[in-house]
Image: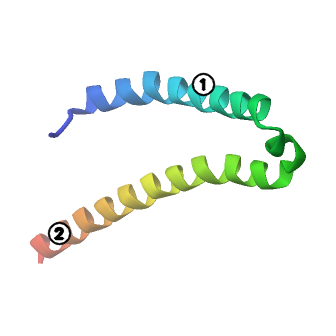
Amino acid sequence: MTMDKDTKFILLVLGLPIIGLVYCGAIIATLMTFPWTRHHPLIVGFFVMFVPFTFAASIWIRASAKAYQKNNIMMKSEE
């Protein structure tokens, strides 16, 4: 299934903030529900930071690899 640029843009503009709000709500609910999370703020904070960073880095690397591959194909076709 391929999406056109407009659909991807709509998902980025509307979906990303909604996902962020859900993620923040889940973090707040976890902090309110489990006392362990309040007693170990460094561990919880690391994972709270690590999850979105890993997600963003994987998207960035995938897009860079796709652009690099496309650029290599274009360079080979010019030769």
Question: What secondary structure is found at the residue carrying circle 2?
Answer: helix
On the image, which quarter does residue 76 sit in? bottom left
Label 2 crowd bin: few (<14), some (14–19), many (20+), radius 10 Å:
few
**On the rendered image, what quadrant is the N terminus found in?**
top left
Q: Residue at x 34, y 65 (%)?
A: 65
Position in image of residue 48 (x %, y %): 69, 46
Mark number for residue 73? 2
Q: Residue 24: x percent and y percent? A: 66, 30
User: Which dot marks residue 10?
Assistant: none
| Colouring style | rainbow
Is residue 13 placed above or below 37 in the rendered structure? above
Tell me the residue at 44%/26% (across/down). 15
Amino acid of disc 2? Ile
Give the Cα separation between the discs numbered 2 and 1: 40 Å
Is 24 in front, or is 64?
24
Q: Locate residue 71, reporting x and y percent.
A: 26, 65
Location of mark 1 (residue): 21
- Residue at left 89%, top 46%? 39
**Callout 1, which amino acid?**
Leu
Which of disc 1 and disc 2 is earlier in sequence?
A: 1
Farthest-out residue, right? 39
